Structure formats: structure tokens, C-alpha cells
Amino acid sequence: MSVLIFAELDEGKIKKSAQEAIFYGAKVAQMMGTSATAIIIGSADNTELASAGNFGATKVLHAADAKLNEPNGMAYATVVAAAAQQENSKVVVLAKSSLGDAMTARLAGKLKAGLAANVVDLPDLSNGFRVKSSIYTGKAFAYNELKADVKILAIKKNTITPEASDAAAIVEPFTPTLNDADFAISVKSTEKSSGDILLPEADLVVSAGRGLKGPENWGIVEDLAKALHAATACSKPVSDLDWRPHSEHVGQTGLKISPNLYIACGISGAIQHLAGVNSSKVIVVINKDADAPFFKSADYGIVGDVFDVLPRLTKAVNAL
Amino acid sequence: MKILVCVTSVPDTTTKIAFTDNNTKLNKAGVTFITGPYDDYALARAVELKEKTGASVTVLNVGEADSEPVLRKCLAIGADDAIRINAEPTDAYFVAEQIAAIAKQNQYDLILMGRESIDFNGGQVHGIVGEMLNTPSISPVMLLDIDGETAKITREIEGGKESLEAKLPLVLGCQEPIAEWKIPNMRGIMTARTKPLNVVEPSGTDKLTTVASYELPAPRGAVKMIPADEAEKLIQLLHSEAKVI
Ligand SMILES: Cc1cc2nc3c(=O)[nH]c(=O)nc-3n(C[C@H](O)[C@H](O)[C@H](O)COP(=O)(O)OP(=O)(O)OC[C@H]3O[C@@H](n4cnc5c(N)ncnc54)[C@H](O)[C@@H]3O)c2cc1C
Ligand SMILES: Nc1ncnc2c1ncn2[C@@H]1O[C@H](COP(=O)(O)O)[C@@H](O)[C@H]1O
């Protein structure tokens, strides 16, 4: 009856968002008086697998079939569904991510599960199963009543802050039957900016808009991001103009992020932009126009010219 | 080729969300409802494929009568006919079941949806429909070309993109820049009036989830302004006051 957590790997390491998911799942297991099992798919060494225990999983099911080395939402969903059946899991937890999104829905279909996406808090089990989620692109929350026998929770970043112990999980190999149909999509090529901090995973984000005037000026944004170990993001016009890649664009039609710190440079703060970033813990706005709407949604603000302010901030960070 | 486009009727992106009835209902007073922005991309690509290959385009919405203006607008943009499943669309599984039932009757080659609805933002309906139909689902799709029986697709992934190929039929969740949003012209608006809009009663399961109540986020505290000539102070505050760096 354990709570099952899908823990996503990135190059053989458990992703940070997956650590949050494990910690979250272990808390839910505790509330339900049961244990937490993590399912990990793809190749990773034993120490890494066992480290799921640091975040509260007592057991790890490891599906290492070579066919699963490339992330594949459909096949991974089949594996997780099989694990849920084996463990008789009534609650399945995943972190929101590109892969997680692809799996969640397929899983819900397979398990006929009650599904809450964008979960932002632990469930309330005092009367049924109720869980809070973010809706209307961060403009509101819903308290969802999950009535199905099996429940799936897709949690947003920063829903919970994991505390690591030094406990190790027991690792068991898991070899479910795979469906050929799950391999019907063939990946021809992948383009990925490597080495950078993944935006959806980032704790700190430096973002810039049209106020930067052109792609040639992004150096000052990248310098500040590098000093902070932050990811970079941008507004929609910036990606529409091809100044920055589309995968960096945040807002209503882009990524929705919830980092600890979001620094907006030369972004006016249109409601569609705010929709993607308003659940950030701390928001800093730097804009030369004191009337820019973004200041109304900020925690800290500087009325000033980004070309002057950003290099000074970078210097100050390096001096910390 | 037969294409089904699934569309939502959602509050305009500039809407200030508010609730009534003890926070159990969206306050619709003064709210303009639009086609989901991502659904608009799906529709625009479907209409392009229609113009290029002579495909038929059906639009579908699971919703109550007040979503018909959105369906009419889709007809004006170029869809051939519309279906409305008469039910409140509050649970992704339930909505998917309705869409899958129609798809099983009509055998579409492509089911195009938005990457996510902008009300409940689950980004889930396409995957559940795919599962119900035993058909691959892919999202978010940025480029789509059809070459005979094969779809060539570019999909966004974290920090980049991926080129894919798969055989039809497929269920896809779409986003920019798959096509440019289309605006209906006068002729489209006129012909839309006579295109069929069929209302069908829902079938299938009870809802697996319901919303007990809604809540608005707590307002942010007052903004603390730092003079530009003391910009360095910001870093100190983020470090020692906000403790985020
Ligand atoms: C359906 C829909 C969906 C949308 N989705 C999104 C979305 O997902 N994400 C998104 O970002 N937008 C989205 N938009 C667009 C949104 O409405 C705004 O147009 C956009 O966010 C503006 O981007 P910006 O702030 O970079 O540019 P602008 O609005 O042009 O603002 C530039 C800002 O930079 C400031 N500035 C200029 N020079 C300097 C300087 N030297 N130093 C400091 N400040 C300076 C200016 O004062 C101004 O405030 C959407 C719109 C629609 C209709
Ligand atoms: N009520 C609905 N009627 C028709 N299509 C829908 C409905 N709800 C969601 N969809 C489709 O599914 C996509 C993803 O929605 P969601 O899973 O709610 O984020 C949307 O962009 C639509 O294309």
C-alpha cells in the first residue's frame, strides 16, 4: 500500500525536483501510516539510487532496461503503472517537468486516477483526500477533492523544502513488461543547451525583457546569472524576436516557474508575464520607468537603467 | 485526412480572477471568454493543413451553452463543423472520456489540442485521451508537418527541443510557433452561421475530482525600493533579509 514516487534522473542523478517529490511522497506516506517507494527509470549507480532514502523513500524500484535509457513519457508511464500495481499504491507523486507532464496524463488514463496537477501543498486527509493546486496560471488556487481509488499528485517546484538524512533506501531491480506501442515515437535529434542550469529546476532566476534592447546586450544578464548560479529567462517578445530561445520564455504562454528569487530586468510586468512568475518567493524588479506595473508585484525594486545597475549587482554578488 | 481540434472557453488572459458563492464559483461578471490561446494555435495549424491538403476540421468543446460563441468563432476561422458535449468541464479525466468517445466514433487522423488550458492548466487532457485511444500523445508541439502517414514534429523539452517522427493517428498538444493565430474575416463569420454545431449529451464516468473551494493568493507585501545609486544594497538585503542568496 506504499506511496509511489516517480524520481526523474538527469544524467544519472536524481533531479532536485525529484528529491522534492520523494520528500513530499514520504510525508504523505507518513500521514497515511505507510511507507514510500521511489521508482527510478534509466541508468544510475547504486549509491545514487539508494540516496532516495535521504529524502524518505524506504525502497527504490529500479527499471534499468536499456530501452528506457532515453526518456519516453509513454513507456515510463507504463513502468510506473506497473510499479503502482505491484506496490498496490493508492497515491502516486511526480514532480512537474517536461517528462513528468507527459507521464502524468498517460498514468491517469491507465490507473483511472483522480489527478491534481500543479499541487502546491501537502494533502488534507481529515475528510477524504483534499489537495491545493495552482490554477488560472497562478492567479488562484483550488482545493481539489480526489475521489478515485488511486490519486496522482503532480507537484510544483518549491511545494516543499526537502530535509536530507543519511538513510539509504533498499534498491530492488524492477523489470516490467514493456509495450512496443510505447516506442512508436522516434526521436530523430535533440538540441539542448548544455551546462546551463535548467530553468524549471532553478532556485534563482535572472530574467530580462525588451528593455535590454537587443540580444547583443545579454552579457550583463548572463554575468549576473553566473555570479548567482541562477538560470536565465526572458519575456515573450524577447523569444518572439529570437533574441533568446523559446524554452527561456516565461509567462502565460511560456514556462510557469516558482523559484526562490526572480529578478526581472527591463520587463514591464504585463499580466501575462506575471502569470508565469507570480508564485516566485521573492521578486525583484529593475526598470527605468517608476510607473512600470511590475513594481506593484515586487518585493524589492530599483528604478534605474539596467545597463548601469546590472553590472553593479554582479560586482556586489561577487564580493559577498 | 480528418482532424479534430479540442478547444476550451476560458477567461481572457487579462482577467482579474475573483470568486463568488463563498469561493465555490468563478465570478463571471464582466469576464470576457476567449478560445484558449494554445487551442488557437492548434486550430490555426489545423486550418493551414485543411488549406494545404483538403483535410476536414471538426472543433469540439466539452462545456455548457455559454461556450458556443467560442465554437462559432472557430467555425468562422475555418473549421467545418463543431460539437459541444453539454457538461461542465471540471475534471480532466471526465473531459478526456468525452473526447475519446467522439474520437472512437469518428476515427480522426489527428487530434490537436492546446498544450494546456489556461483555467485549470493541467496540460493533461491530451495524454489521457491518447491513453484511452491507445494512440501516442506528444506535447508541447512547436512544429508539425504531415508527410503521408507520418508526422514530423518538433517538441519543446527542458532547455531545448527535440525532433520526432511518428505515424498517424496522433494526439498532440500545441504551442507557438506551430502557426500564427488566425482572426476570422467577414466571409468566415457569415458562413459560420450556417455550419453545423451539434450538441451531444455526456457519457461515461462520474467525475473523479471536484473542486471544494477556490482561494486567491495572499497579496504581496509593499515593495521595498532601493535607490539606483545604492543598487549594491539590494544584494545585501537579498542575502541577509530575504535570505534567498
Ligand atoms: C495571449 C497573450 C499571451 C501572452 N503571453 C506572454 C508570456 O507568456 N510571457 C510574456 O512575457 N508576455 C506575454 N504576453 C505579452 C505581454 O502582454 C507583454 O507584451 C510582454 O510581457 C512585454 O514584454 P517586455 O516587458 O519585455 O516588453 P515591454 O512591455 O516593451 O517592456 C519593456 C520594459 O523595459 C523598460 N526599460 C526599457 N529600457 C530600459 C533600461 N535601459 N533599463 C531598465 N528598464 C528599461 C521599460 O520601461 C519597459 O517597462 C502575452 C500577451 C498575450 C495577448
Ligand atoms: N472542456 C474542454 N473541451 C475541449 N477541449 C478541452 C477541454 N479541456 C481541455 N481541453 C483540451 O485539452 C488541452 C489541455 O487542457 P488541460 O489538460 O485542461 O490543460 C486544452 O488546450 C484543450 O485543447
Image (spheres, coloured by chain):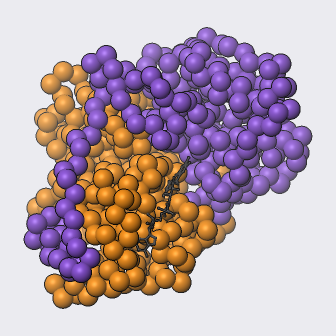
Chain colours: A orange, B purple
Tell me: residue A160, above or below residue A64: above
Give how far across and how far down residue A257 sits, in percent. 37, 56
Quick check: A213 left or right of B74?
left
Whole-percent x, y for residue B157 in the image: 52, 61
Q: Quadrant of the N terminus of chain A?
A: top left
- Asked if one can make out residue A268 in the rendered structure from this viewpoint, the answer is yes
Residue drawn at (27%, 18%), measured in percent from left and top?
A: B22
When the figure is inspected, residue A307 is found, relative to residue A146, above or below; the finding is below
A115 vs B142, left or right, is left
- Camera-side residue of A41 and A109: A109
Q: Residue furthest top?
A: B201
Q: Nearer the viewer, residue A281 or B28?
A: B28
Q: Residue at x 52, y 37 (%)?
A: B12
Q: Quadrant of residue B91 in the image? A: top left
> Which of the 4 image quadrants contains residue B112?
top right
Count every numbered label the image shows and give the total: 0
Residue shown at the point (34%, 25%) measured from the top left: B19
Q: What residue lies at 16% left-to-right and 84% top-to-bottom?
A: A320
Horizontal and vertical percent for residue A251?
46, 54
Q: Of A188 and A287, which appears nearest the observer? A: A287
Residue A233 in percent (x, y) is at 43, 67
Q: Judge from the rendering whether residue B193 lies leftward or rightward of residue A229; answer left or right.
A: right
The answer to whether one can see residue A16 in this image is no
Above or below, comparing residue B82 to residue B168 in the picture: above
